[in-house]
Image: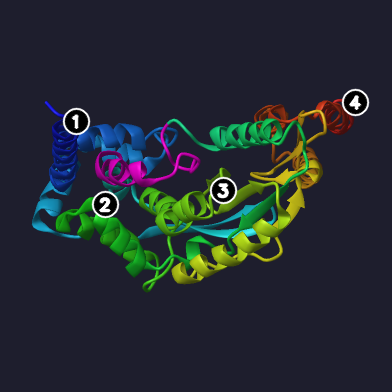
Amino acid sequence: MTSEERRKNRRERRIARRKEKRNATIASFEAIVDPDNLLKAFKRSRKAVSWKESVQRYEMNLFRNINETIRKLLAGENVTKGFVEFDLWERGRLRHIKSVHISERVVQKCLCAEVLTPAIMPTLVYDNSATVKGKGLHFAVQRLICHLSKFYRKNHFSNEGYCLSIDFSKYFDRVRHDLLFEMQRKAVRDDRTMKIIKDFIDPFGDGVSLGLGSEVSQVSAVFYPSKKLDHFIKEVLRIKYYGRYMDDLYLIHESREYLVNCLEKIKEKCSELEIVINEKKTKIIRLRDGIRFLKGIYSLTETGKIVRRAFPASRKLMRRKLVKFMRFARAGKMAFSDIRCSFQSWRGNYLKRYNAYHTVRRMDGFFNRLFVS
């Protein structure tokens, strides 16, 4: 067998494997209406919310509810039931949440786990971390640290470099449905499945916007700028040290002029997707001054050490919260055990990721002065 024949055989085997994957994706609707998959989706959906009355009521007639869901899906009916809407203050910002009902959440969980995620996740770059199984916030931070270490070694143990930090303005509110559906159709390739996806996304806005309380919206938000932005940055701009977590991006390079040029080209790509870049939070900074990413500051020193610091605003916010908790405790509206649990959660889950020994000591002293002494 000649080398040309071996290449031809390998090419035919690759084409055959791609067809098998494509056929598995096309048969995706059957996976959504499978009773076993819906049952597994319910078990995942009730985690941390099994105490709610609506979840318990749904579980009392679980198999009847699943059968009714399958009947509606096979008949092409809409399974959405509207939203439970409420406002949430997060880090001084008001967020309007549209939470879906448990019956709809089960279908969304099944759709994402069996169809949407397997179809679109292989198209993402490796350093796209949000809503990907096995990755997440901790993975994104570790990749940034890895990129800084590799940059230091590649540039002859020097921290003379720059980072372009980009943040999108009201990202979820600006996602266009027609562009999103066009991208998803190429990955899903099934009309019945696409109808279900549209039924979940269309209620969030008239042709634009995604919701914060929907899993389908979260997966779609990760996928939306992937091809035109992530792959463009990695493959056309040739940025090796790049990462994205939902609407937070960073590009690391030794040349500031090149990053300025990259920013102009990224703005052009964002305009095609109608994504608006937040000019106040988008900056080019030196690596020694610290990269602001996911509520942390990461600085590369001359010796190659990476110093991780917490946001000062987070410490100020917790101080204000503790003072407010003290008033609630004196008025009998809040127990000390709940206050201590809240403080320890912030202290352990947030501060432990940073070099914050003195911050922990100061915050412990502040807490003791309010509630112990």
Which of disc 4 and disc 2 is earlier in sequence? 2
Locate the N terminus and report the quarter of the image it occupies: top left
Does the segment drawn in magenta span residue 112?
Answer: yes
345 left or right of 275? right
Q: Residue furthest front?
A: 2
Q: Is residue 32 visible?
A: yes
Decide which of 68, 282 is in the foreground and name it: 282
Which of disc 2 and disc 1 is earlier in sequence? 1
Write down the residue under mark 2. 187
- Where residue 71 sits in the image (x, y, percent)? 10, 50
Q: Element at badge 2? A: helix
Instruction: Choose top left, top right, bottom left or bottom right for residue 284.
Output: bottom right
Looking at the rendered image, the disc whose residue lies closer to the viewer, 2 or 4, is 2
Looking at the rendered image, the disc whose residue lies closer to the viewer, 3 or 2, is 3
In 3D space, how far apart are the residues under numbered discs 3 and 1 (Cα atoms)? Answer: 35 Å
Label total for image: 4
347 left or right of 235? right
Decide which of 139, 228 is in the foreground and name it: 228
Write down the residue under mark 1. 3
- Where residue 37 sits in the image (x, y, percent)? 21, 35
Write down the residue under mark 3. 239
Report the residue at 80% width, 30% height from top.
356
Which of disc 4 and disc 3 is earlier in sequence? 3
Instruction: Give the amino acid type for the residue marked by disc 1 in the picture.
Output: Ser
Locate the C terminus and report the quarter of the image it occupies: top right
16 left or right of 278? left
- Where residue 105 sits in the image (x, y, percent)? 32, 46
Q: Which residues are magenta?
A: 110-133
Write down the residue under mark 4. 373
Q: Judge the density around disc 1: few (<14), some (14-19), many (≥20) Cα neighbours within 10 Å.
A: few
